[in-house]
Amino acid sequence: MNSNAFRAALRSTTRLGQHRAAMAAPRQTMISLRQTARSYASSHGTTPAPHTNSDAAWVIGSLLVFGPMIYKLTAPPPKKKAGESDHHESHKKAEEDAEEAEEAEETKTASVVASTASPKHEKDFYPYILIGAGTASFAAMEAIREKDPTAAILIIGNEDIGPYMRPPLSKEMWFNKSEETTENLSFKDWQGKERNIVLQGKEKIDTLNLEDLEKIMSAESGVKLLTGVIVSDLNVAEQSITLNNGKVLKYGKVLLATGGVPKTLPVLKGANADKVSTFRSVEDFKHLHSLVKSSDKKIVVIGGGFLGSELAVAISHYGKDKNIKVTQIFPEDGNMGLVFPRYLSKWTTSQVEQEGVVVKANSRVASTKTVNEGKQVELTLENGEKVVADHVVVAVGIEANVELAKKAGLELDDIRGGVVVNAELQARRNVYCAGDMTSFHDVTLGRRRVEHYDNAILGGRVAGQNMASDKLHKTYKHQSMFWSDLGPHIGYEAVGILDSKLSTVSIWTKKPTVTAEGDKKETTSTPSETSTAERATATPLPAEAVKVEDKEKYNKGLVLYLKDKKIVGLLMWNNFGKVEDARKILGQVYDTEKVEALVKPFGIHEE
């Protein structure tokens, strides 16, 4: 049989197999194949030599040539494995898991790469440079090393200490029972476990100075920390940075995590500089702590927000046995007046006062001067009242540290402050930002700038993952949480946007008693005038009506913040471990008919 005849036979046989595969038995098909091949040979005038084994030869030849094809055509479909779902049923889950799967694949690839030698780099070049040695940079560093285990990372910070946690500086550090624990920069967390504020991870961080940096001929795999140095310039086009000593470093990708700068008050310039300080760093904590170690000190805290209120309560607690007097001054109606509903802000002030703090709400400093031979500061308030202090702490918020970004020509947010980035935390090509100085696109709540620890951790991590990945670019969808404690009766956690100018709905464990012209009464109305929650309280309540001496008035509750009928923020008051539940309803439309079901996961009415 010539080649043309054989190819014709093969095509004909293939069509026959496709048409009858599901019905023909293997033996019948094999006979058909043999007959077809023989007929094609006979049609071209070729007569096989007669011998007794001719049929056997055709069978064997046909089996060798067409056997695999026949098996494939006639074999039954493979059985599903136990628990295997139908394609259509699993399609949705596959889409949801696509991002995680791709990340896992990249991590697997990174593990393979890790077994190879670290690449050589030219002098003064680092694949990753992280500017700012805070929480965001630490989280980014860990994420980069997870994806790129051979990565050479340089972290640059202006302090003489590595990445550390700031929240304990105004909270737990003041409640230590041992001065030695405090001097070691340690504290006990809410579980009673002693921890250090310096962040510890699985990566070893080698600390450098400028002289050490100069000796490095090629960046090697690992993490280097350059302390006490300021980056004075960023050249996006040339992918380089300039240090304050003039040294130029090249980068592959760079992270800006420069944090924030404490705001000051020009009116305090009349006091000696050593009598007034802001509060942001470890050094600020050490300085203030050393001042109140001695007895009979008068400390003034200016600011009624998160930091000001925490510090006032913390210092008052620490100084109870030292005759330390703390006065807190701010222009709002009550503590956390820009965050809490007015009635809750007023009640919070009553609790802060019970901690020994003298609170002067609705007050502003008009002028200052030094008195008692420069040993003290006299503050004159706008109402004429005078307050004398041994030291003044300014805690009126921070401004995003964008000086470097501004010089580099990055886009800035004139409304919120900070560097404008997309949802992947990228400002420009190979330039990423994270932490307090970042104005990012929140896919749920719109553009935001968030000044909280949790945001620095998760934002830094996403930025690091994106920096170390050429394929995967994660969207920053995390809704960061924040928390605070103001004395023994107030502790809260929150997510989303908390703004006292927004409409709020509050649900408490018991109906608060209020007074109107001296009479006690109860209220169950809500902003919509009705509620299915029997113990839901009206908001806002008139501030002058709140009986602030009732410690248990607001012992456990939930406050919903609304914008355009959507839930944009949740305050969980003395109600802990419910952050994930809060994140689930963030962005939902508020419906008064469904309020009971909405708040059920928070256990407000549970005994």
Image: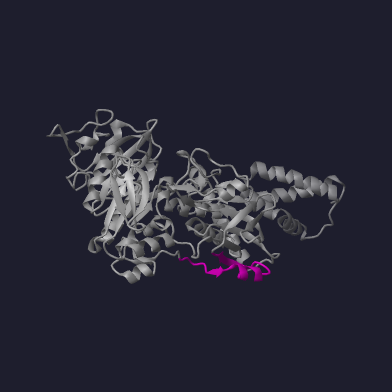
Q: Total number of numbered labels?
A: 0
Q: Is residue 305 magenta?
A: no
Which residue is painted at 69% across and 65% down in the image? Answer: 121
Which residue is painted at 67% across and 53% down in the image? Answer: 239
Q: Residue furthest top?
A: 529
Residue 577 visible in the snapshot: no
Looking at the rendering, the stretch of residues picked out in magenta corresponds to 200-227
**Image: 403 above or below 124:** above
User: Left of 35 or right of it: where is 90?
Assistant: left
**Image: 198 above or below 582:** below
Q: Position of residue 401 (x, y in %)?
A: 52, 49
**Image: 4 above or below 563:** below
602 or 484: nearer the viewer:
484
Q: Position of residue 547 (x, y in %)?
A: 17, 40
User: Left of 368 or right of it: where is 514?
Assistant: left
Q: Position of residue 104 (x, y in %)?
A: 54, 56
Which residue is painted at 83% across and 47% down in the image? Answer: 5
**Image: 58 above or below 426:** below
Q: Residue furthest front?
A: 373
Q: Quadrant of residue 113?
A: bottom right
9 or 79: nearer the viewer:
79
Q: Position of residue 14 (x, y in %)?
A: 71, 45
100 or 462: nearer the viewer:
462
User: Left of 126 or right of it: where is 46?
Assistant: right
